[in-house]
Structures are given as C-alpha cells and as structure tokens.
Image (tube, rainbow, N blue to C red):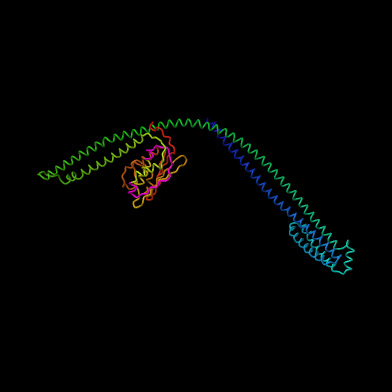
Amino acid sequence: MTSEKLASLGRDRRASRVIIALLALGFTALLVAAAATYWTQRQNEENAQLVSHTLAVEARLGSFASVNERMETARRGLLLTNDPAFARIMAAAQRSAIAQVKDLDGLISDNPGQRARAARLRELLDAYQAYNREAVGGDAAARRAVVEGFMTDTGVAYVREVRSVVDAMLAEELGLLREREAEQRRTQALFNTTLLLTGMLIVAVAAVTLLLIRRNLAELRESREQLRILNEDLEELVDARTAELSRANAEIQRFAYIVSHDLRSPLVNVMGFTAELEAARKAIADYLARSDAGTWQAPDGPTRLAIEEDLPEAINFIRSSTQKMDRLINAILNLSRQGRRSLAPERLDLGVLVKGIAESLEHRIQETGTRVEIGDLPGIVNDRLAVEQILSNLVENALKYLKPGRAGVITVSGSTEYGRAFVEVKDNGRGIDPRDHDRIFDLFRRSGTQDQPGEGIGLAHARALAYRLGGTIDVQSVLDEGSTFRLSLPIEWKGGDENA
C-alpha cells in the first residue's frame, strides 16, 4: 500500500511538472504571437509611412509638372501676343515651380538619386528662366524668329528635359512603391504563418494539458475516496480516544470531589480544637484573675505573655487559616460540581446576555463611576450558564481592578471569523504585568496588589469552562494601561455527554 502511494505521488509530481512545462510552452507561444503581432504592426506602420511618403513625392512631382506646363504655355502666349497678362501668369508659374522644387528637396532628402535629379531640375529652371528673359525681352523681329523656329527653340528643349527628369523621378517613386507593397505582402505572409504555427502549437498544448488534467482529476477522485475511507477510520479512532478521555476526566473530577471531602474532616477537627483552646485560654485567664486577687503567686512574665498574647495569636491564626482552607475547599467543590454538570447548548444572543450582566452589576458600576460600552455581539449556540459565568467573571474583574484616580471605561465588542465567535472585554484599569499573563489563569494565582477579595479561582474556572465549550481565553495587557480579554467560542457548539 505504501509503495502504491509513493508511486502515485511520483506520477502526480511528474504530471505536474509536465503540465507546468506545457503551460510555460503555451505562454511562450502566446508571447511569440504577441511579439510577432507587435513587429508586424510596426512594419505595417513603417510601410504605410513609406507609401504615404512616396505618394506625397508623386503628388509633388505632378504638381511641379503642371506648373511647368503652365509656365511654358504662358511663355508661348506672351511670344505670340505680347500680352502682359501672360507675363504675369508666367512669373507666377516660375515662383510656384521654384517653391515646388524646394518642397521636393525636403521630401527626397533620404534618396541620393532623386536628390541629383531634383538638382538637375533646379539647373534647368534657372537656365529656362535666363533664356526666357532674353527671348521675351528682345524686339518684335527676335520674338518672331523664336516663334518661327519654335520646334528647335532652346526653351522648348529645356521643357522637354524637365519632363524627362520628372518622368524619371516618377518612375523611381513607382518602383519604390512597388517594392514597399511587396515588402508589406511578405510581412503579412510571415505574420500569418507565425500566427498559424503559434495557434497550432497552442491547440496542441491545450489538448495535451487537458488530457493530463483529466487524468489527474480521475486520480484525485480516487485519492479522495481513499481519504474518505481513512477519515472514517480516523473518526472511529477519535471517538474511541474521546470516550477514554471523557472517562479519565470523570475520574479526575471524582478524585477532586473525594479529596475535597477528605480534607474537610481534619479541618473540622482543627476548628474544634481551636474552640477548646479558646475555652482553655478563658480558664487560664480566670485563674490569673483569682491569683491576683488572693494569695496565690502569679506566673512569671514570660508565662503571662504566652498566656495573654501568644496563645490568642496562635488561636486566631489557626482560625483564619482554617477558614481560608474551608473557602478554598468549597471553591474546589464548586469547580467539581461545575465540571460534572451536563452542558445543554441553546441559541444565545450574546448582546442580551452581556446587557443582563451589566444590569446585575449596575450598583457597582454607578458606585465607581464606570462607563460600560456594549457593541454588536454575535449570536451563538452554546450552554447559557457556562457562557454567562465566563463573561460575568471577565466583566466583574474589569470592574474590580480599575485604576484609582482614572474614570473607568469597559468595552465589550464582538466579531465572527471562520466559524468562530470572538468576544473582547477591554478596560483601562491597572493592567497586568506581562510575566503574569499566563499565571493568572492558574488555580489560586493572582497578579498585582492583593487589595480585592477573591481566592484566584475565577479566571481558572473561566478558562476551564471555555475549554469545555470548545473555546479559549487569552489576554493582552500593559501594566497601568488596561487589559483586553478575548474569548473565542464556536458559533455552533454541538455539545455531547462529556462525562460518559
């Protein structure tokens, strides 16, 4: 059985490692896909910018070509008609052509070949303008000669060369546009391929992971069934041990009860002897009185001191000690009776319970000028008498150990968490030395100045009751600042016959 469990554990570990590796591979594939998407997006943006740049260059070249044709048309009209309006149109076209070439220089600054062609355009424009100034500025015979030889005119040759340069630049930009479109198609194809491969990898990883998880779930169901069987066996074992502990607890309680009764017998005898000693002391005192009045010789000084002072002092000490022992034994008997009492869980409103405790202590509260604040407290299912005894002890202690000269404030608050109810009793009293935080829960142990009545039983009894109710009590305190006692109980205590 052990070897099977170890083998199953080893398989689970191997399967977990494989699942983690597959998930890591899947996440890596997703990261690759994300990186490919980002890279493709950046490439597309760059290609779009380049395409936009090429289209802008083509548009500028087209605009320049149009201006150049308008300038040549105006020149011809001026030569034919000598109309000043054509001169104005030609001048405007020349200025526009220069501006177009300047803008073109800025767009093609990253292309050396196009920059050389743009420089040639500037040269042709300058030569064209210089030639036109001479041709147009001549006399009528000179203009007529230009018109008659128009097909071989130098200005026409400049215009034709400009057209040729513009066509070459357009061809260059068209070639770049086609290259960029081809690059964009290649980028998109690479992205599609990467995305397809990544998707196939993710599907494969998901399929294998689901198969492994399904197998692990089947093994988990099998392990859960085995755990259920083990838990049933464990519950039976716990029930048996609990029965043994209950019987042992009953034996301890009976032992405490018997010891308490056995201790009372010698105490009764001691108290009886003290009564006889008191009677003897009176007889001796009478004897001394008669001896002083008659002829009898009185005892010496030490004898008289022993009779009149030592004997009464011893008798009083024995009496006070036996009375204290009697109170302690009665307290032990009370604890024994409480330990043997059957607890009966019922639904309790802790807020109502604490208010009832405060009302029962109202006289003491008014007498000390203490303010008691009760917050929202949860409802629980538990033994009413036991819970009331615990909370009464905590509130009474807070009221009993106030700091002299400081207005008392006692706050009772509550909360619930993880199926448990918590009640805190907080005061601003004397506080408890950290060394005594555990000691105060011991039987017959107290902390600080012993100026209040009590035998050191209350907190021990409260903690014992809390344990019986499935809870705990702890304390947080700072000397001279106050204390906070925290009671923890199950919200719903099932109870049971603890004395079985």
Horizontal relation, residue 193 to residue 485: left or right:
right
Horizontal relation, residue 83 to residue 21: left or right:
right
The image quadrant of residue 320 is top left
The image quadrant of residue 389 is top left
Q: Quadrant of the C terminus?
A: top left
Vertical arrangement, residue 302 with respect to residue 383, above or below = below
> Residue 454: percent from the left, percent from the top?
32, 43
Vertical arrangement, residue 374 with respect to residue 124, above or below = above
Vertical arrangement, residue 163 with respect to residue 360, above or below = below
**Residue shown at the point (30%, 38%) measured from the top left:** 330
The image quadrant of residue 150 is bottom right
Question: How many numbered marks are there?
Answer: 0
> Residue 44: percent from the left, percent from the top?
70, 50
Does the segment drawn in magenta span residue 290? no
> Residue 279: percent from the left, percent from the top?
18, 40
**Residue shown at the point (31%, 44%) measured from the top left:** 453
**Residue shown at the point (38%, 50%) measured from the top left:** 481
Horizontal relation, residue 24 to residue 440: left or right:
right
Residue extent of the magenta highlight? 363-388
Q: Which of 2 and 89 lies nearest the eye of the viewer?
A: 89
Does the segment drawn in magenta span residue 378? yes
Horizontal relation, residue 90 to residue 229: left or right:
right
> Residue 5: percent from the left, percent from the top?
54, 32
Question: Going by the picture, which residue comes out furthest to the bottom?
Answer: 139
